[in-house]
Image: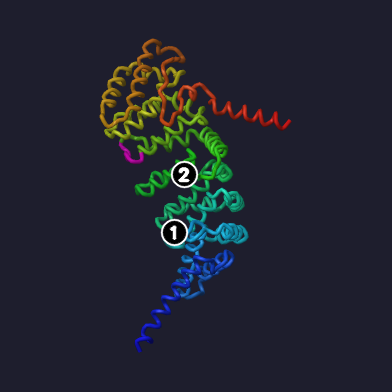
Amino acid sequence: LAEAGTAPRRGTEAANLRGKMRRLFGGKTPSEYVGSCSRCLDTIFDEKVPEEKKEKSFLKLERNLKDMANMLYGDGEGAPINEGKIIKLIREFRQNNLITRLVMNIQKLGFEIPKSISKILCFWLHDKKVYSEALEYFSINPQLIPHLISYFEKQEVSLPCAEIVKEALIHPKLLKPALEEKEGALVFKVLDYVALKDVAFASEAYGMLDSIINCRLAKEHSISQDKQKEHLKLVAKWLDANYDRFWKKVHAFMEPSGSHLMMEQILKLVYQILKTHRNYYVMMRYINDPDNLTRVMKLLRVKNKKIQVMAFNVFKIFVANPKKDKRICEILVPNREKIIKFLNALGADDELDGQFEDDLEVLNEQLNELQKFKAESPKMEVKAPVVTPEAGINTEKALEGKSGEEEAEKKEESKKKESTN
């Protein structure tokens, strides 16, 4: 009797162990996994199937997708990653419409399944050995990215959708059509999400926007430096073409009475845009607009240290401009002493680092230089030392015109042509 009582329990333990061993050491082939997932989806979305059977298929789909994710990333328990199986799994993705079905129904698949979908697709878009196939797949299925963005606001899938979109739109091949479709409607949709009242949603939406505009990369990303430059070049062209509409939406976050959290994030975005060499023409247009200078100066007075510091970073680009528009000078010259006094008070804060103090010292010199010129002149050239923004970007070179980086690229292209000839 004792043995009979323990038999079912031992049988369950053995079954669990066999299931675990099978998942770890290849009980199912990639083809079997993909086929099983497709059949599960058939059952889940078949209106004639009883709910109980749908529930079983739902759980099986969840388990299969987790197993496939483990196949790609490892299970965390030391089982070796089988490179051959990864290649076969990716091949199955391309030959089967499973990925399209999962993405287009991601909003209907609960909480856990979308997380596995995100892990699988992010691996495919990221891994240097297979990402080119992912780009091809997304290119021939252009409906996938718009669908993911459209369902970002659904709580259960917001994070998985955002992760996939960020990983996909880092690549110029996928970014280009996204920017061109309906004059970049997808980007403006993301900007609308940044305005959501829910802080978690808004912050995640900002992450998507930052990734698109500034090519924000995860560590050890497979995308090359040439592709990063191509990404930023596409964005610069788009920003120039959609200048008024883009800045109107961005400026809505820069009202002194608005959310301080999102204001700080947006100021970081603005600063990054203005200091990026590729955005030279956008920067010059922006920093020669007196309304923009006034807007930034108002934010310097917001009673929030982080916002004041970020507003200062943007403000110093206006001051560093060696060819200031007359209207900019008409704001800076009469208010020079007040600005210097205010900035010195801001710099007295012990919490600020030495870089801020150095920038402040140089900015004071540049403001003092304004005394030597008349505000009536159409352009005012101020040959003062240049305020150096964060990350080692030389503002002076950026303000002079095309960056040395672009000239170096031209030289490199010339060398390639010569060698070809």
Residue 106, above or below 397: below
Q: Residues within 10 Å of mark 2 (few under 14, many from 20)?
A: few
Badge number at residue 413: none
**Left/right of residue 191 with respect to residue 124 in the rendered view:** left
Identify the residue at horizontal 58%, vertical 26% (top origin): 407
Region of the chain picked out in magenta, as a range: 257-262
Q: Nearer the viewer, residue 223 or 312?
A: 223
Identify the residue at horizontal 44%, vertical 43% (top origin): 191
Could you give the CA–CA distance between mark 2 and mark 1, rounded to whole angstroms?
20 Å
Please give the residue where the numbered disc 1 appears in the rendered image.
76
**Residue 373 placed where, x, y %?**
40, 11
**Left/right of residue 363 with respect to residue 395 in the rendered view:** left
Identify the residue at horizontal 44%, vertical 52% (top origin): 152
Judging from the image, what secondary structure is the residue with disc 2 in?
A: loop
Which is in the foreground here, disc 2 or disc 1?
1
Badge number at residue 219: 2
